[in-house]
Image (cartoon, rainbow, N blue to C red):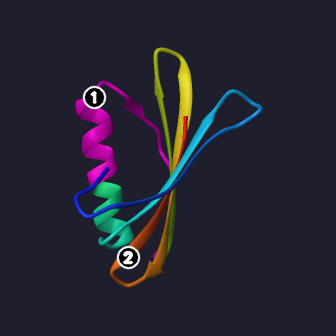
Amino acid sequence: MPRGATLVSIRNLPSGFTLVQFTSPRSVNDSLLFAIAGLQSAGYTVGRGIAGPGETNLPFTKGGKPGAIRLVAANSCTTSWQILA
């Protein structure tokens, strides 16, 4: 989690995935760059996502297990994160 992040919830879904939600004091673009760097340094393969000015979806895999990060601008300086893995 980025510095200054605030945890919202952690839920285990019936599908077997875990959903982690939090906010961070960064723009969506800064959050995206932070996520890509963190995933790659941890050995994840980062896929090509869908990016817009206020929302981004970023798929990733490791060991054949998929995941995704969704970033949504709460305002110009706060991003809402949803990590599904």
Q: Looking at the rendering, which quadrant does residue 19 occupy?
A: top right
Residue under the point 33% across and 61% down = 5
Amino acid residing under circle 1: Ala
Q: What residue do we see at 55% from left, 21% from top?
A: 65
Q: Which residues are magenta?
A: 34-53
Does residue 33 appear in this view?
yes
Q: Residue at x 32, y 50 (%)?
A: 1
- The secondary structure type at the circle numbered 1 is loop
Q: CA distance from mark 1 to mark 2?
A: 25 Å
Relative vertical location of residue 1 with respect to residue 39 in this rendering, above or below: below
| Farthest right residue in view | 14
Image quadrant holding the C terminus, namely top right
Residue 13, image quadrant: top right
x and y, in percent, of residue 20 in the image = 52, 47
Return the residue nearer the eye: 69 or 24: 24
Read off the residue under disc 2. Answer: 78
Find disc 1 in the rendering and name its residue. Answer: 42
Tag count in the figure? Answer: 2
Q: Position of residue 69 (x, y in %)?
A: 50, 49
Look at the image and say whether residue 80 sits in the magenta stretch.
no
Disc sitting over residue 66 in the figure = none
